[in-house]
Image: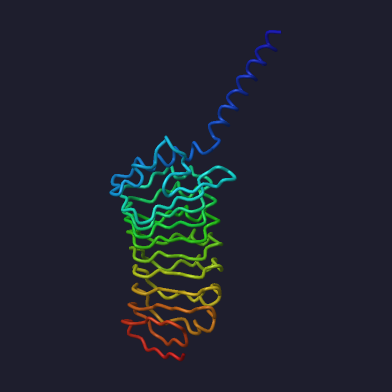
Amino acid sequence: MVNLLSRLLLFLLSLHCFVACLAANTKNITTDQSALLAFKSLITSDPYDMLANNWSTSSSVCSWVGVTCDERHERVHSLILQNMSLKGTVSPNLGNLSFLVILDLKNNSFGGQFPTEVCLLRRLKVLHINYNKFEGGIPAALGDLSQLQYLYLGANNFSGFIPQSIGNLYQLKKLDTAQNRLSGPIPQSISNLSSLEYIDLSSNYFSGEIPKWILGDLTQLISLSLMDNQLSGEIPKGILGHLTQLKTLYLGSNQLSGKIFSLTTLSVYYTGFSIVVYV
């Protein structure tokens, strides 16, 4: 009888712990509120008081400036804080916004390393952090954002290589890493991204040749900008014949050689190679 009672008490205690842990791991709008308040706490300058006067527990998270909620799930769907002159670092707590689809922090002064926790946001389709002051490497964990369609990392201070994991973003339509300090060869894994329409890798320190896989794999490509890098060698022959959707091609300020034929917009200045263009 004693053993039976002991087992029953142990079972009830285990059940209580299980329910408590489950409740602790369940994310809801309160989780989102906590994540956003943690984000706000790391902002060191808010010159227009956009968040200081608006992000308050006295009002619904879904009414906060820059925040949009998914009515069906009652969770934060998008965080859009463009052009607010905000300064600070980005809180890793943003990784708890598990229903986030759009994260847009364009044209602020966020700095430091971009938190890898954001790469936990499996529903994310748009990541726009152009024109900030992020530094360090591009997180390899970005390759986990399998739903991502638009990736804007331009005009920051990112350095190092583009991680090979970028090739896991099979839904990606636009890739922008322009105006950073990235180096090394253009990664082979980009050839996996057959949905890509726009690539802008300009104003970095990429070296080596223009990869020949561009000819066969990126058939949806509309615009390709590789200008202002350290690329060398010949332009792949037949590049325009294979990329039938291509409208703009920017290759200026490299050390390339070869000929180019027929496209709508052409930028090849300061390259030192010969060009033949038929329109």
Note whether 192 is above or below 114 in the view shown: below
Q: Residue at x 35, y 40 (%)?
A: 41
**Total marks in image:** 0
Residue 2 lies left or right of residue 152; in this view the side is: right
Q: Position of residue 246 (x, y in %)?
A: 50, 78
- The answer to which of 241 and 197 lies nearer the viewer is 197
Q: Residue at x 47, y 45 (%)?
A: 95
Q: Position of residue 109 (x, y in %)?
A: 31, 53
Note whether 106 is above or below 50 in the view shown: below
Quarter of the picture holding the N terminus:
top right
Q: Position of residue 97 (x, y in %)?
A: 49, 44
- The answer to which of 81 and 252 lies nearer the viewer is 81
Q: Quadrant of residue 106?
A: bottom left
Q: Quadrant of residue 230?
A: bottom left
Residue 98 lies left or right of residue 136; in this view the side is: right
Note whether 115 is above or below 187 in the view shown: above
Residue 263 lies left or right of residue 112; in this view the side is: right
Q: How is the image coloured?
A: rainbow
Q: Position of residue 101 (x, y in %)?
A: 51, 52
Q: Residue furthest top?
A: 1
Q: Residue at x 42, y 42 (%)?
A: 36
